Amino acid sequence: MEEVQRHSVHTLVFRSLKRTHDFFVANQSLMPEIDESLEKMKFNIKARDTYGLVFDRTAKAKHLAALRGDSGRPEHPVQDSVLAITAGGESDHAINTQTALLPTSSAGSQNSTSNTVQILPKKAPTIPKPKWHAPWKLYRVISGHLGWVRCVAVEPGNEWFATGAADRVIKIWDLASGKLKLSLTGHVSTVRGLCVSPRHPYLFSCGEDRQVKCWDLEYNKVIRHYHGHLSAVYTMSLHPTIDVLVTAGRDSTARVWDMRTKANIHTLGGHTNTVASVVCQAANPQVITGSHDSTVRLWDLAAGKSMGTLTNHKKSVRSIVLHPSLYMFASASPDNIKQWRCPEGNFIQNLNGHNAIVNAMAVNPEGVLVSGGDNGTMFFWDWRTGYNFQRFQAAVQPGSMDSEAGIFSMTFDVSGSRLITTEADKTIKIYKEDDEASEESHPVNWRPEILKRRKY
């Protein structure tokens, strides 16, 4: 038996290339036939694409000159070259090729001035001056929880607010006096999310024990449990017009629940990491989620499917807030805060300045956006222009370590005049506007030339 001769890979590849070359070499000399009409069309399209604006303006100028009875035109060599390019004619667009480019006006030619059209440079976009907002100051500190205070929700009647903490207790406080009204126990781990229904006497809560509870505030008892999450539930939101509840958490999903039947209507899957924030609104997109996978997703609630994914952030998105009156929302990440326009999620601008993890944001009807960081820093922004008009470090309580200066959640009351924050030093802080401040004492330090906004 003859031994089969083994060749190297390089030899086999070379032979394959040679066979391919020999196979196709016969067709190499045959060039495709040139269609003159297609060539003319190509030149016309290129000329229109490059000089379309000039064609239109000079055609108008020629028309005006003809109306005035001024038909003189100086010879121009560049025009003749464009005339040659577009000699095929473009009857559909009625381009006047004799005035394809602007004639250069000279001192000796009087007729050229009437044909010359000045193309003015576009004005640079001006950044509007921000509206003046009064600075905010600390108004009240409430203590009572025995652990990190992780979430807060204000009742629609603006009489009380609820907080949930790592001590597994939900506490209800009087908004006017700051006094404790009620404590609700039932969770067996940290309470991470709260919301109050505007149409029912219900308070909803979720926590790291994977439980989602509905409390009847007339009896102060749990009346429903929503079972389905596979891990800790970090955030929740009520739909403003439909009786559905949306919860999300560490199992990378957001779940839509029928408030009354406890049925899991949709499971919104697509994120690849913890979903840290969810908000609902009446118009599309009805649900918006932010995740530790650095993306923001827009969801169609009726179909239970994703309408789009915003991938502009480079780090985890831990907070999303809807503007109360504009069709816009903001998302917060350690790299920056980004503003978007609904429904497609068109990017508007970046708000730069935070150099920490941003856990929470809130916005009031006056256009004051507040963001709170993991290191206790609070930034106050003008929503429209992105101007940072105030920033300060939240003070920790006596006896607390500096590392406990973290802000976990925040919200404005219904009127927008009080800001409630929950913090790592186990306190709840309430802020209000400084009544004594004026535009003269706290002027707007607006220097738009130093703003370098990245458009992504």
Image (cartoon, helix red, strand yellow):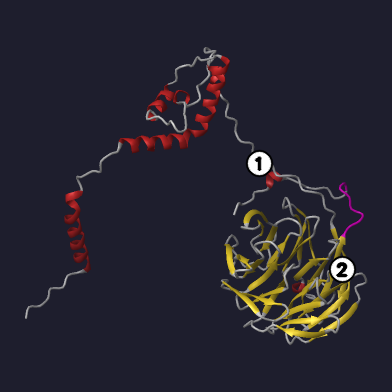
Real-space CA distance between mark 1 and mark 2, rounded to the nearest whole angstrom? 41 Å
Left/right placement of residue 245 relative to residue 33 reads right
Residue in front for this viewpoint, 389 or 414: 414
| Residue 86 in picture, x, y percent from top left | 40, 30
**Label 2 Cα crowd, 10 Å radius (few <14 / some 14-19 / many 20+):** few
Residue in front for this viewpoint, 402 or 439: 439
Which residue is painted at 84% across and 59% down in the image? 136
Residue 435 shown in magenta: yes
Residue in front for this viewpoint, 336 or 218: 218
Q: Which of marks 1 and 2 is nearer the N terminus?
A: 1
Q: As displayed, is residue 300 above or below residue 251?
A: above
Residue 316 shown in magenta: no
- Residue topped by disc 1: 125
Q: How many labels does the image show?
A: 2
Quadrant in the picture for residue 250:
bottom right
Quadrant in the picture for residue 335:
bottom right
- Which of the two marks, 1 or 2, is nearer to us in this view? 2
SS of the residue under disc 2: loop
| Residue 9 in picture, x, y percent from top left | 22, 68
- Residue topped by disc 2: 158
* Stretch of the chain drawn in magenta: 433-440
- What is the three-letter code of the residue carrying label 1? Pro
- What is the three-letter code of the residue carrying label 2? Asn
SS of the residue under disc 1: loop
Query: Is residue 327 something that shows in the picture?
Result: yes
**Label 1 Cα crowd, 10 Å radius (few <14 / some 14-19 / many 20+):** few
